[in-house]
Image (tube, rainbow, N blue to C red):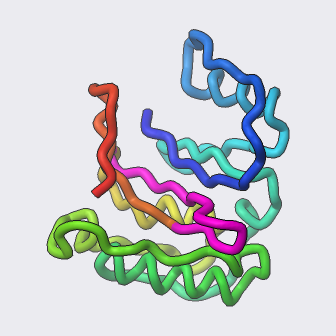
Amino acid sequence: MALCFIENGVASRDWRAASHATPEALLNSFVAVVPEYAWTAVGSRCVLHPRQDIWRASLSGKAFQGPRLQTARAYVEFLRGTAAEMADLAPPLLKGDPAAALYTATVSIRENCSALQGLVDLLGPDPSMVFTVERQDADRRVLFFERVDAGEKHHERE
């Protein structure tokens, strides 16, 4: 199972991955040691995220649909304008081929959903797609999309 991750800037703790029967058991062991994080199953995906209500709260707004990069940029602007906790979130940057499916695949976000659901909706149906929200500096977090190969022990950012 591919994991989506939203970084909150908390210093790492002394947590070591051990053998677990399921991805859910692994995530449960992590959040037990690092209480600043929670994890949520969104459809068939797991998202590790800061333990803040804003990520799971229902946000009223509008539906979005279009190419992934364009839709992601519009959705990030919506989040920034809707919730003060999202003010430091920056839209994804274009890296690589602008015609790649990573950026051009048509995706849609439902009208009323949580920020987590909206971010997962940006991935579309491709199970190899994940997102990360990474802190770039004290004032900015950036949304990234990646394609991972669960059968290999590596991933590539496109």
Location of the N terminus by quadrant is: top left
The x and y percentages for residue 120 are: 49, 59
Does residue 108 belong to the magenta stretch?
Answer: no
Q: Is residue 149 left or right of residue 27?
A: left
Spot the residue most to the front.
Answer: 137
Is residue 141 inside the magenta stretch? yes
Is 13 displayed left or right of 42 in the figure? right
Q: Is residue 134 left or right of residue 16?
A: left
Percent from the top left, x then y, of residue 60? Answer: 68, 82
Q: Which residues are magenta?
A: 128-142
Q: Is residue 56 above or below residue 89?
A: above
Residue for point 72% across, 60% down: 56
Residue 141 horizontal/vertical position (percent):
61, 67
Quadrant housing residue 96 = bottom left
Task: Specify the principal SS of the magenta part.
Answer: strand
Residue at (59, 13) in percent of width and height: 20
**Image point 56% across, 42% down: which residue?**
46
The vertical placement of 145 against 126, above or below, is: below
